[in-house]
Image (tube, grey):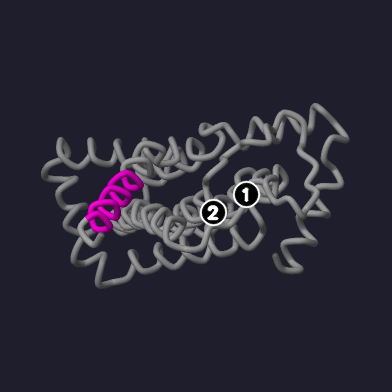
Amino acid sequence: MNNLDTTVIEGLNHFSRLSWTFDTLVGYIADCNLAKGGVLVAVFWWGWFKVNSNLARIRIHLISTLLGSFAAIALARLLALQLPFRYRPLHEDGLDFLLPYGIAPHSVQGWSSFPSDHAVLFFALSTGMFYISKRVGLFAIVYTIVVIILPRVYLGLHYPTDVIGGALIGIAITLLFNSTLFTEKVSTRAYNLSITKPEIIYPILFIVTYQIADLFADSRSLIEFIFLTIRTIIHAHIS
């Protein structure tokens, strides 16, 4: 644990258990998918249907952003399984972390702290909102930091470096998926299909945005199951 993590966690932890109402509110927000993914998905669909002279370009970038967000959360899960396990602040014995009201000591037990899935996913999605407009992108970034990220750090679910690392991964992947090469080869074709075959593309967009609103809970479980199954099979053959 570095000085940044220690300083921020200990500083925020001084406010723990000063107010049952405050701790409970923060815990509710951190656990409410509607307040997290639901809001940003609503921003996505607002940008998709908002009448704009650059509507085609915006939709192409929004498709790239969705695909990038899906790839980002998949990479985050693989990294969490492959990198050395990192305990979360509320599980770290040497930290003397005071649990806020309403937080169970066994919360997210067995899940590595680095990188933060929330930071990866929502910074990836928020970065894509800049393609709608700078103001929309700024709102998405600020909303992600204040409503989604800070509560998780306060509750001891993540260290600041978990969040910073996750944010860098999410931003980098979104920018990569919004590069000219990817948008021309993939996203533009998907956009054209949304015009000629909306009965195909819109159900796919619904499923993807639904998974984002639900924080890819089902998708993450599936990816982890597949990865662990493959690793088990490989180890069985080696041994």
Residue 134 in the image: x percent, y percent?
52, 60
Nearest to the eye among marks 2 and 1: give it. 2
Separation of disc 2 and disc 1 at Cα? 9 Å
Q: Are marks 2 and 1 in contact (CB under 8 Å)?
A: yes
Amino acid on which disc 2 is placed: Ser
Judge whether residue 54 can be spotted in this image: no
Q: In the image, what residue type sits under mark 1?
A: Ile
Task: Name the outermost residue toward the left.
Answer: 196
Q: Residue at x 40, y 41 (%)?
A: 216
Residue under label 1, please give it: 149
- The region drawn magenta spans 223-236
Instruction: Name the residue nearer the viewer: 200 or 52.
Output: 200
Q: Residue at x 70, y 45 (%)?
A: 90
Q: Callout 1: few (<14), some (14-19), or many (20+) C-alpha neighbours within 10 Å?
A: many
Residue 130 higher or lower than 39, as above or below: below
Q: Residue 96: which disc?
A: none
Indicate the position of residue 211 as horizontal and vertical percent values. Answer: 37, 38
Q: Does 224 appear in magenta?
A: yes
